[in-house]
Image (tube, rainbow, N blue to C red):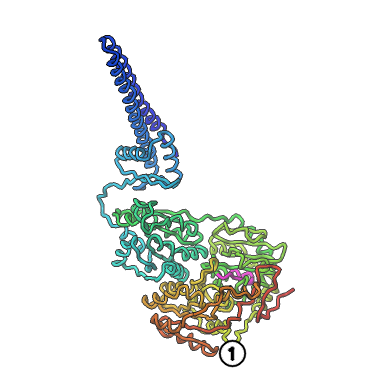
Amino acid sequence: MAFTEIALEEAMQRMQAIRNIRNSFMVTVWISVVAITISAASMGLSLPSIASIVTSVVMMGVVIPLFLSSMSDKYARREYVELLVTAAMTEFMEENLRSDTLILDCDHGYELMTMLYRDTNLEPEEMYRGISDASVRLGTDIFLRARGRACGIILNMAPIRQSDTMKGTKALVTMLERKGVDTVFGYPGGSVIPIYDELYDSGLRHILVRHEQCAAHMADGYARASGRPGVCLATSGPGATNLVTGIATAYADSVPMIALTGQVGVGSLGLGAFQEVDAYSLLMPITKHNFRVLDVNRLPHAVKEAWEICQTGRPGPVHIDMPVDQMNASIDESLLDEKYYTKPPAEDLSALEEAVQWIREAKRPVILCGGGAINASDEVMALSRRLGAPVDTTLMGMGVVPSSYELAMGPLGMHGRLAALEMMNSADLIISIGSRFADRTYGKRCRMQDPAGRVVHIDIDATEFGKHGHPSANLQCDCAKAVRMILERLGTASVSGDWTARAKDAKHRCACDPVPGSVPIAPQTVMHELNAILDEDTIVTTDVGQNQMWAMHFLNIERPRQLLSSGTFGTMGYGLPSAIGAKAAMPDKHVIAITGDGGFQMVMQEMTTSIAEDLPVTVVLLNNGTLGMVRQWQKLFWNERYSATTLKCDPDFVKMAEAFGAEGIRVERPGEIGDALRKARDCGRSCIVEIMVDPEEHALPMIPADPNAAMVRGRCGYVLPQ
């Protein structure tokens, strides 16, 4: 930290001047001691009397000067603290004129405090007095906050406002409304009661969840279904920690979200107050950005920047931590109209011409679409048609191209379609659009095998480049924009008709058997029946596990944002709450949650939320009495040692649905599935369709992560070229 040299020089001069006064006083006292001793001797006093006088004088000449020396030195050092803090804060204030509360936090605060302790060696209470003197000098309030290295100095400089004011809670709700927010998912608690009191009179709809994790999942589902940021709200302490899994799920899949948490008052931070947790630090690794509103006048900056940050570049959740005293404080209404600007995402198109040239030279290109291409569907389709190139997708990229498109190969990866695998293995160029080349998608056997193969990688996030191990032309840019620029430069370029014909043939051969008539019911049959009722007005969410892989492999997804699933984080319990969030965002859509009996029991209390908030969803519950995916691995790779994967004492899910006020239907025969699904869709309220499926049926084909392990095909008869 840089302090002005003049202020430092003044501080040193003042400190030295006080010490000079002290030294002069001590010299005067000692001269007086000598004079009194000589006078007493000349007066002929007895030896005992002289000794007594000398002792008294010595005491007065040693103890009192030492005491006065100590006091004057302490005063001098406190004066030094006052001047140094004043100098530092004055300079800092000049550099941050836009702020009413200035914070020297962490390293800066630590550096200042280290300098003060080093130069003065004052006790903490004396240090605070020096800072208090600086407060008087500055005409403001200064607060010292310290906890280990994380110390800082906070200046409260808010002047007396002459204009209109409002409470921080009112400002928060007003700004959310101005941003177009219509729904908040949350759960109240002590530190957010003021916010909930403001919501009472607002136009925002609040969805009262039964667990804060599900508030985050609902905000996630809302955002994925609508493309608009979802908002969740929780109290301090356990409320904030319960949000963690939901926020991490959104972060892993790049979902725009605003997570609001209450916090103890600023004066109680770091003191272990009731329901205090450092949510700011806790959520930092799983959010794009964090704000802690230590001064209500910084609230507009936090909300406006959070709104932009969560959507620009690679989307993701942003967290705002709000101490309760600041939310109860008054804020100048004019601050809500101030403009704040976020840095635009970086772009690097320097490899554009090289990328276009590689595409022209390619004989067997394949397009790989990930979640980053969700807003580039038209551009991807135009590129595929221009080139005659097949399109593989990741789980997150499903719907970017319609499943019915003749060159849509389906999902690639461990549980993907073998047509997608064949085209990827045979390609000489991958045009990756918004894909991360994640391990479950682009494994050792699910990759381009051509040793001369190349990659054109389009992604807004440069940290995703270089993971695949091939020569690459990287375009850091919005996917839709980058593809449009490629199309402009390609002209009429296209690939060999043989490659296009091969892709169409592969898609035709990759037709899966719905396994009709089997009892217990095969999950493939359930997916086949679901395909019969899926239309443009249907949104499907999934949980995690076998149910997710069956949905990914077999469902015909025709548009972006039609299939919502926890891809990267793999969060069990995601299906039901995300479906409720999607329904809140798109009330005219029919929303289906595909789940298993394991994942559903993690969040089944949210059926109450669905009923109470009139957000009807259909829950397709595939009940096999096990934690199916883990059990599948135990059977295939762990010698059938089924440890802790049998779900004993499952409840009666039909009676449970009825207890919640929902419909409940149990299906035990394949012929009953279609009627049950249509009844659930048309009943007008939430419904659990419990389908008893075969516990021995696995999510296949499966390509093990171990390159030496054989592919597990199951019923799949697709023949890969040698």
Identify the residue at horizontal 64%, vertical 78% (top origin): 507
Residue 156 appears anywhere in the view: yes
Q: Look at the numbered disc 1 and give the secondary structure of its residue.
A: loop
From the viewer's perspective, is residue 652 above or below residue 397? Answer: below
Residue 408 appears anywhere in the view: no
The answer to which of 216 and 298 lies nearer the viewer is: 216
* Mark 1 neighbour density, 10 Å: few (under 14) some (14–19) many (20 or more): few
**Which quadrant of the figure contains the C terminus?**
bottom right
Picture coordinates of residue 409 (x, y %)? 62, 74
Picture coordinates of residue 353 (x, y %)? 62, 58
Which residue of the protein is positioned furthest toward the right in this rendering?
Answer: 722
Residue under numbered circle 1: 517
**Which quadrant of the figure contains the N terminus?**
top left
The answer to which of 24 and 720 lies nearer the viewer is: 24
Q: Relative to residue 624, is residue 40 drawn left or right?
A: left
Q: Relative to residue 343, is residue 187 drawn left or right?
A: left
Picture coordinates of residue 64 (x, y %)? 31, 25
Q: Which image quarter: residue 83?
A: top left
From the viewer's perspective, is residue 84 above or below residue 678? Answer: above
The answer to which of 459 and 243 lies nearer the viewer is: 243
Which span of residues is magenta-colored? 382-395
Magenta-colored stretch includes residue 651: no
Picture coordinates of residue 597 (x, y %)? 51, 78
Q: Amino acid at mark 1?
A: Gly
